[in-house]
């Protein structure tokens, strides 16, 4: 039977790597959402060549929660059931945002509020169908507020808490909610950052995420060693933490 996967932020490097591996392994109809038509079209063709049974695209900017209801309606005019909902868009933002009220508001919208609104819009479908996987890419940045990226971190931390509550609610409906917390991954979002031994690639983490989806895990760090790194960061006492440039 053909399964339906709906991906918001489909052109993101992490989502693209997951999709390429999924469609090569089973029969999928893919519904791809993104804000730029050209890369979406290219991804659609690529996935059809790699084995997707049906591929559709919806062009939309998901970064504003006020549009979430319309986006959900549009998706539901294409599909009546969703086996996997993957949300993988986001923006790191610039450090200058911390003195810019408007930019702070925008980053919280893109990375938290809009995703929360979309998830609330899709919830009745999942409650009714009583199955499915909701998979959201959060971040290790949400585990502790740090001077270098606390607006993005606050958004991802809020998102992780939202997902924790959603998972609690969805349990009795048989719906699985997976929180994915990547560490440093080489993608366009992080292209400007210097790379080192802690860095990984979308292709390396995609199978870990796919495995976590089908084994109904609640929360994963990818790669897994980030669980221990962030455990250590959370344990640092403030007198030491405040002297670091983390
Ligand atoms: N890379 C990392 O180190 C890392 C670590 C932790 C978490 N993450 C998370 O992983 C997810 C995927 O990011 P990535 O690393 O794969 O980076 P990426 O390839 O740069 O993807 C970011 C995606 O977000 C989309 N996007 C940004 N703002 C949007 C908006 N307002 N509406 C619709 N789409 C929007 C971008 O669309 P366009 O193509 O149109 O720009 C792009 O598809 C994000 O949630 C990110 O926060 C990444």
Image: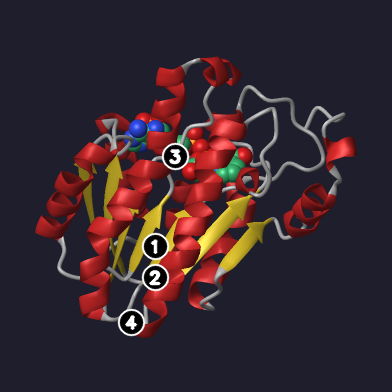
- Mark 2 falls on what kind of element? strand
Judge the density around disc 4: few (<14), some (14-19), many (≥20) Cα neighbours within 10 Å.
some
The residue that mark 3 highlights is: 111
Mark 1, mark 4: which one is toward the viewer?
Answer: 4
- Which numbered disc, 3 or 4, marks the residue that appears first in the sequence? 3
Compared to 236, does 246 lie above or below? above
Residue 64 in the figure: left or right of residue 110 = left
| Separation of residues labelled 1 and 2 (CA atoms) | 16 Å
The residue that mark 4 highlights is: 173
Q: Residue at x 33, y 82 (%)?
A: 173
Residues 236 and 179: in front is 236
The residue that mark 2 highlights is: 133
| Separation of residues labelled 2 and 4 (CA atoms) | 11 Å
Question: Please, which residue is most extreme toward the right here?
Answer: 240
- Res 19 → quadrant: bottom left
- Which numbered disc, 1 or 2, marks the residue that appears first in the sequence? 1
Compared to 32, does 2 lie above or below? below
| Separation of residues labelled 2 and 3 (CA atoms) | 20 Å
The residue that mark 1 highlights is: 23
Confirm or deny contact between disc 1 and disc 2 (CB under 8 A).
no
Mark 2, mark 3: which one is toward the viewer?
Answer: 3
Judge the density around disc 2: few (<14), some (14-19), many (≥20) Cα neighbours within 10 Å.
many
- Which numbered disc, 1 or 4, marks the residue that appears first in the sequence? 1
Q: Position of residue 188 (x, y in %)?
A: 53, 30
- Mark 1 falls on what kind of element? helix
Q: Position of residue 91 (x, y in %)?
A: 48, 32
Residue 24 visible in the displayed image: no
């Amino acid at each position: 039977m053909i399964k339906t996967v709906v991906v918001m932020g489909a052109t993101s490097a992490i989502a693209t790597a997951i999709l390429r591996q999924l469609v090569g392994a089973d029969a999928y109809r893919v519904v791809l959402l993104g804000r730029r038509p050209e890369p979406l079209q290219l991804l659609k063709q690529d996935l059809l060549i790699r084995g997707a049974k049906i591929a559709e695209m919806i062009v939309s900017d998901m970064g504003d929660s006020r549009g979430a209801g319309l986006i959900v309606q549009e998706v539901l005019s294409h599909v009546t059931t969703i086996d996997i909902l993957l949300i993988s868009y986001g923006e790191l933002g610039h450090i200058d945002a911390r003195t810019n009220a408007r930019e702070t508001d925008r980053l919280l919208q893109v990375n938290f509020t809009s995703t929360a609104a979309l998830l609330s819009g899709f919830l009745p479908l999942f409650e009714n169908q009583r199955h499915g996987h909701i998979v959201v890419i959060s971040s290790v940045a949400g585990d502790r507020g740090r001077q270098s990226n606390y607006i993005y971190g606050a958004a991802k931390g809020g998102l992780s808490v939202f997902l924790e509550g959603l998972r609690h609610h969805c349990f009795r409906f048989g719906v699985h909610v997976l929180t994915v917390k990547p560490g440093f991954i080489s993608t366009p979002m992080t292209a400007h950052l210097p790379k080192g031994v802690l860095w990984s690639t979308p292709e390396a983490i995609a199978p870990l995420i796919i495995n976590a989806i089908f084994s109904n895990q609640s929360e994963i760090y990818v790669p897994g060693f980030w669980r221990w790194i962030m455990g250590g960061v959370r344990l640092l006492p403030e007198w030491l933490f405040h002297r670091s440039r983390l």
